[in-house]
């Protein structure tokens, strides 16, 4: 009985499969060209359920990650404390300036982290 139902329904699902397959391949290729790995579109497709909005999210991901990292790093900073958050602010400004100059997130975050560690360990 199940095989008979499957064989009856299968021809009706081919057009839907072809449409989803084409969109999935286009989205995967677009993510790959944008520099993301294989697992990014897979995870986004399973969690976002945004349909065509996932195409718009590709351009927003690096900025969102950068902003989330800044918020995460500033979550426990006491701006009324000893150093008034100066090491964090100086490091964030350096990170943003380096990112605006070279557009390389890895280099800018690494340099900002190194600057923060030097400021915390040796200056403040």
Image (cartoon, rainbow, N blue to C red):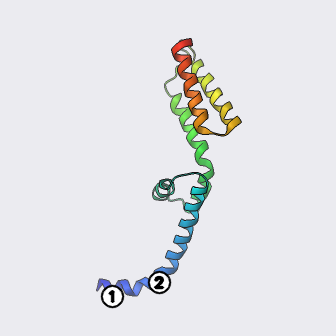
Of residue 77 and residue 87, the one placed in the foreground of this image is 87
**For mark 1, what is the residue?**
4
Secondary structure of the residue carrying numbered label 1: helix
From the top left corner, tell me how far across and down residue 44 is, in percent: 50, 55
- Where residue 114 appears, as percent x and y from the top left, is 55, 25
Question: Disc 2 marks which residue?
Answer: 12
Q: Residue at x 55, y 27 (%)?
A: 113
Query: Can residue 79 be seen here?
Result: no
Chain-order first, disc 1 or disc 2: 1
Q: Position of residue 29 (x, y in %)?
A: 58, 61
* Distance from Cα at disc 1 to Cα at disc 2: 14 Å
- Which image quarter holds the N terminus? bottom left
Specify the quadrant of the image occupied by residue 105. top right
Residue at 59 percent of width and 53 percent of height: 57
Give the SS element for disc 2.
Answer: helix
**Which x, y percent locates residue 61?**
58, 47
């Amino acid at each position: 009985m199940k095989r008979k139902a499957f064989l009856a329904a299968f021809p009706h699902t081919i057009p839907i499969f072809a449409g989803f397959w084409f969109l999935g391949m286009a989205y995967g290729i677009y993510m790959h060209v944008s520099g993301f790995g294989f697992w990014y579109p897979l995870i986004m497709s399973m969690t976002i359920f945004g349909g065509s909005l996932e195409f718009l999210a590709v351009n927003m991901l690096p900025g969102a990650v950068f902003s989330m990292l800044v918020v995460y790093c500033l979550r426990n900073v006491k701006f009324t404390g000893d150093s008034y958050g100066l090491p964090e602010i100086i490091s964030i400004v350096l990170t943003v300036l380096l990112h605006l100059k070279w557009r390389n997130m890895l280099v800018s975050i690494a340099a900002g982290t190194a600057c923060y560690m030097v400021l915390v360990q040796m200056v403040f």
